[in-house]
Amino acid sequence: MAAYSVLILLFWAHAIHGMKTSKPNVLLFVADDLGIGDIGCFGNSTIRTPNIDRLASEGVKLTHHLSAAALCTPSRAAFMTGRYPVRSGMTGHGGYAVLLFSAASGGLPPNETTFPKIVKEQGYTTGLIGKWHLGLNCESRNDFCHHPLNHGFDYYYGLPLTLVNDCQESKPTETQMSFKKDLWFYAQLFYVALATIVACRLLNILPVPWIIVILFAICGNAFFMYWFTAHYFYQRWNCIIMRNYEVIEQPMNLEKNAFSVVKEANAFIRRNRDGPFLLVVSFLHVHTPLFTTKEFRGKSKHKLYGDNIEEMDWMLGEIINVIDQEGLVNNTVTYFTSDHGAYLEGMETSYDLTGYNGIYRGGKGMGGLEGGIRVPGIFRWPGVLPAKTMVDQPTSLMDVFTTVITLTGGKVPQDRIIDGKDLMPLMQGLGPHKHHEFMFHYCMEHLHAARWHDQSSDTVWKVHYISPKFSPEGSGMCRGAKLCSCSGNDVIYHVPPLLFNLTSDPSEKFPISHEMAPYSQVLHKIQSAVAEHNMTLSQVPQQLYGSNNRWLPSLQVCCGVFPFCSCNKEDNM
């Protein structure tokens, strides 16, 4: 009888364990600034990416995969919400293309629904390791209204803003470069003017009341001290590591970051091996300053840029190995992508430290060009998704939202427009599926291009309304500037619009003459779709505009004594 009872208990324990793991785990990898031509399975034969290539060989490769923006913050907002960033106010304006400070009040609005929020409701443990870049606080330094834990994640470890050259002391600055030049010029002008006014007042040449001179001096000093302070302490205040709501490294230790990301990701997987879990690993690679640990420096054929990619591939491999070791491979959906195309202009004295977007024209910051938005996409789920399969239909990072929610048993929100589609029927080849008939491509808040997938002929058409002016002309980049412009005098307004057949001309080299038969028909179809799309847009608070994207001392997270914030709690544990 006792033996029978033990058998019953074992049976129920096994049944309960089976119920816990009946839903698939979800593991999402997002690279930063990685070009579609930078990895082996998408055509690169000189940079070694065996672990990413393994995912592709064991799963489905999406060769027409598109980000919703060509810059970090808007692309990641679309990834998290399944919506074009223009719908959530996460598009840039003027010189404010992404979130610039960890102490800015802008960020992913709390009323946006992210896929981790819905997945969490289905009984999942959710985690984010790595880069966030979608804001922290709204009104105080500890309200954390934009924090990952307020957007559905149970656990967070990583960099709340983004990696930039300013995070490494030996590198030249890359934040607000033109603004800093103007600031320095006007500061000199101000102090010369102040000295002149004081001298003239002392000599009774200028009959201005001293109170006016003093107020002028105080206001000018306050303005310039504010901005010089924000940039002087940039590394200390923005290049930080947080665990959940706590700052644990300020400034961050770049040398150990790669190992810390792997360690944290693997620990999360092991803690939640009984599942189900959702883990997003958001790499800091391959964003400038391309910091690479000594184990990988000088090992690739493409200098520091190649070293950085090969280190990222190693990191991914270490995390995938734990999935294998824990016996989770057949119950884990794995995805790999990049937030947008590779950065072409470069920030180094050696301009060959830049990415490669394969046959596609343009790069990071160029929201209408394929090189800025065409990204690698890989899904693996052994036994469910066919191995060594390629899908060439237009898909989007926004589709991850709908796909993950559907896989985990959640319901896609019905109270707002969701632009993402469920990719599972397409990847499994199971007949009819929802597809992107039209897609819209923004550069900041400006619509630069739109595409139409005409399923009747299986042709993808693309219309360009605005394109950047390249420097040098025909180079495909804007050398001398950090990024190409989205509007103003540094873009070309196409009247009439340019039309390309992407199916036969993916490099966008040969625009179709407006005198040819398809031009007017295709243009009319796309123009009608753009008009319908515009009707779905509504006015929302702009998160990256003006004061929402400036440094606010009251929002600055700080470990230690402000402004000399400093700590390293990891080494003390």
Image (cartoon, rainbow, N blue to C red):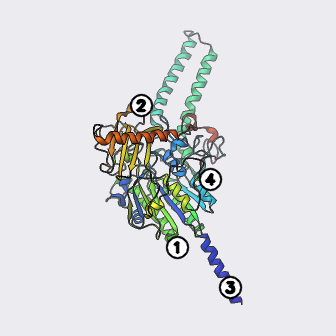
Residue 342 visible in rendering: no
Tag 4: amino acid? Leu
The residue indicated by pointer 1 is 327
Task: Tell me the distance, in whole angstroms, between the alpha carbons under discs 1 and 2.
Answer: 55 Å
Task: Please say if the residues under marks 1 and 2 sit with CB atoms less than 8 Å apart.
Answer: no
Task: Kindly check if marks 1 and 4 are in contact, taking CB atoms under 8 A apart as contact.
Answer: no
Q: Quadrant where the N terminus lies?
A: bottom right
Q: Where is residue 559 in the image (x, y as percent from the top left)?
A: 63, 48
Q: Name the residue under label 4.
A: 149
**Picture disc at residue 70:** none
Q: Callout 4: few (<14), some (14-19), or many (20+) C-alpha neighbours within 10 Å?
A: many
Q: Residues within 10 Å of mark 1 (few under 14, many from 20)?
A: few
- Among numbered discs 3 and 1, the one appearing first in the sequence: 3
| Residue 516 found in image quarter | top left
Q: Which of marks 2 and 4 is nearer the N terminus?
A: 4
Q: Name the residue under label 3.
A: 6
Q: Distance between the residues labelled 2 and 4?
A: 38 Å
Determine contact: label 4, label 3, CB under 8 Å.
no
Residue type at tag 3: Val
- Distance between mark 4 and mark 3 Cα atoms: 42 Å
